[in-house]
Amino acid sequence: MVKKINACVFISGKGTNLATLVKSSRKNNFPLKIELVISNKKDAPGLKISKRNSIRFKYFSSKKMRIFEKKCLIELKKREIKFICLAGFMRILSKDFIKNFSHKIINIHPSLLPKYKGTNTHARVLRNKDRFSGCTVHYVTPKLDSGKIIKQKKVLIEKNENEDSLKKKILKVEHAIYPKSIIKIFK
Ligand code: GAR
């Protein structure tokens, strides 16, 4: 059994990656205990996953990022959080926030970075008629979707692929590589 460290997952939406991380965190070989979930969206469906699993959760508005980050830092300190996983968290964290968790914040992004940073990745990939897309787990830096890559996985784009089918296909792969990336970091 590995010694688990306290982690927080930041979400903005559905939280299917959060669900995968929660499931993984129950296994003996997984290095994180999900102690806290933070959402910048009051109605994020992912918050229901924390409730269902009895994980403490907080909502902070991100209208003013400085205030959002300040509130997060207080809570993270209180819960002795040592590692942060962004899972569909759709805001950019500042340099000042990130320096509190140097090399301790990771993100999952639905493209083969450095290609397609930012939003609407699937639509852009299809428009460009790429043959492959995929997902990437990487360290978070103040530059959008640019930190060192931890793991990446490719998927083939079928002839009749649409945005929805590609999103589903990639999400399935995300659920496999996110926990694996975390195990790799702590090995
Ligand atoms: C995932 O596809 C994740 O890669 C993406 O948002 C989705 C969240 O799904 N993240 C980004 O685009 C971040 N730039 P989930 O809420 O079901 O985990």
Image (cartoon, rainbow, N blue to C red):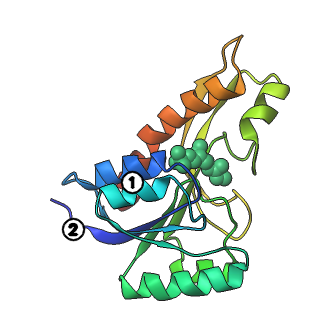
* Amino acid on which disc 2 is placed: Lys
Mark 2 crowd level (few <14, some 14–19, many ≥20, 10 Å Cα): few
* Residue 54 horizontal/vertical position (percent): 28, 63
Name which residue lies at 59% across and 26% down.
155
How many numbered circles does the render carry? Answer: 2
Label 1 neighbour load within 10 Å: few <14, some 14-19, many 20+: some
Which residue is drawn at the image coordinates 29% and 61% (left, top)?
31
Image position of 130 with respect to 10: above or below: above
Disc number placed over residue 49 in the picture, else none? 1
**In the picture, residue 63 is in which quadrant?**
bottom right
Percent of width and height locating residue 104: 48, 71
Q: Could you tell me residue 108's position as x and y percent?
A: 56, 51
- Taking 74 as reference, is 136 left or right? right
Residue at (59%, 40%) from the top-left corner?
A: 135
Q: Name the residue under label 2.
A: 3
**Residue farthest to the left?**
1
- Residue placed most toward the observer, 49 or 70: 49
| 75 up-or-down from 110: above or below | below
Amino acid type, label 1: Ile
Q: Does the residue labelled 2 lie within 8 Å of ligand 1?
A: no
At x 44%, y 40%, the residue is 175
Tell me the quarter of the image containing the N terminus. Answer: bottom left
Q: How far apart are marks 2 and 1 (CA)?
A: 24 Å
Q: Which of 151 and 107 is in front in this view?
A: 107
